[in-house]
Image: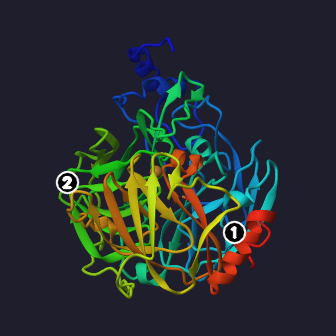
Amino acid sequence: MSLNRRQALGGFFTAGVVGWAGFTASDISVALAQASPPVERPLFPRPVLLAAGDELVATPAHPAFAPQAEAYGYNGSTPGPLIRIRKDEMFRKVVRNGLTEETSFHWHGLTVPTLMDGQPQDALAAGASTEIAFPIIQRAGLNWYHPHPHGHTGRQAWNGMAGFFIIEDDEENALNLPSGEDELILVLRDAKVQGLTRLIYELNPDGHEGDFPVVNGVAWPRTTLNNRLVRLRILNGANARVFQLTSKAPMIVIGNDGGLIDKPHPVDMVEMSPGERVDLLMDLRRVPPGARVGLNCASAEWKLLEINVVAAEPTSWDIPERLSEIEPLVHGGGEPERTFVFQETDRINDERFDMKTIAFAVEQGKVERWRFASARGAPHPVHVHGAHFQIIGGQHTNGNPRRDYAWERGWKDTVLVRTHETVDVLIRFDSYEGRYLLHCHKLEHEDHGMMLNFVVAKDTVEAMRRAEVENIYGPICWPTL
Ligand code: C2O
Ligand code: CU
């Protein structure tokens, strides 16, 4: 890399406004300026909707921050196209692997039958395709799709593979939340490049972090928003980085992984680990037009997104008093049924992931209390497939109770377990029988083995018997669907 920063910025200015795709050669200089934001930040792109009849194809793609680099995405773009669907509809899609290596299509946050879940056992070979079909049986929320092949999830995600999957329903629609131009859908990542042509992915077992922020595929972007109440729906799509979101503008948490929470909670900061989503209202009504507001990351000291506030006609958007009724899960009390200790970079309860091994069986429809604990290598974003859970508390090893975070209310599928911390959750698998996964969503931990299989079954004894046969003969027994 021989251009200095001044030349790089010069190149950037000639590039003009940057869109979702279609970068010119001069835009390449952008790639040299990532270590700090350019004076004029590129415009932030809004995700493009996947057309109903289109296949979803894992493809090579060129990231906006390094347009010459050979990276990955879906349907030629990184992040991939947005999927929007309503509750109770059927999701049907041909998915195709247009890469030269195996990948899988996992629908993070969606409760789906095992065979549709894109687990490592069901990765698609290069060039292969399959038809996905499952009913949307859950409430409104921001979910996402990403690859899940064993050992290579981190590298493929780092290369740009992620896309949004939004569910809508009547409950949410009735709230009249900001929509259209007043709703932003963001995936936060970090990245690291070498020169113009290569994304750097080092196999760091403790989690791979980049040195500049990327929002919807663009480094250091800006956007224009009306001086209204706006809705920011945010996914942490990074491999390992935890973001601490702050802003000078008032932020109000209204939802997370599993959709809306009970009522709005004003916050100064939201901490988000890989895989987690947060739904925020940002109140720009009192920000003077022409002002610039940041969405910042306190821990990295980055301004992730610069928001240029402009004058607009007022709207009817308001902060609802109540958002949703959350049915509290009820547990019989007593000690947790299961404790999972996340160890170093590669183990849960002393085991490394083995595709053929089923660690345990959980009874369908029963509420269990699970405890997640960290033993070195934390923070660990703990993620469960197949059901959502409710966080009921936790402890620090110094004896203090774990804090009650506003963004962790309601239904979650991923929770950040910090150093020296335990987190207790209640969980009930009331949808499908079958094989699901529990793992750390720091993708390098996942790839190195911090993951396990379990089964949901009406008859757990029979399920474990089958699992034992499977241990010997390979994955022939699950799923039974
Ligand atoms: Cu987002 Cu098992 O993954
Ligand atoms: Cu971990």
- Residue 14 place in picture, x, y as percent: 47, 24
Label number found at residue 116: 1
Position of 152 compared to 478: left or right?
left
Which residue is rendered at x = 58% and y = 50% of the image? 449
Quadrant location of the C terminus in the rendered image: bottom right
Q: Which of 8 and 212 is in front in this view?
A: 212
The residue under label 2 is which amino acid type?
Answer: Val
Q: Distance between the residues labelled 1 and 2?
A: 45 Å
Determine the image quadrant of residue 165: bottom right
- Residue 299 place in picture, x, y as percent: 29, 42
Q: Which of 137 and 280 is in front in this view?
A: 137
Label number found at residue 287: 2
| Pair 1/2: label in front | 1
Other residues around mark 2 within 10 Å, as few (<14) / some (14–19) / many (≥20): some
> Which element carries disc 1, helix, strand or loop?
helix
> Which element carries disc 2, helix, strand or loop?
loop
Specify whether residue 186 is in view.
no
* Label whose residue precedes the other's in the sequence (1 or 2): 1
Which residue is rendered at x = 73% and y = 64% of the image? 471
Which residue is rendered at x = 72% and y = 59% of the image? 121
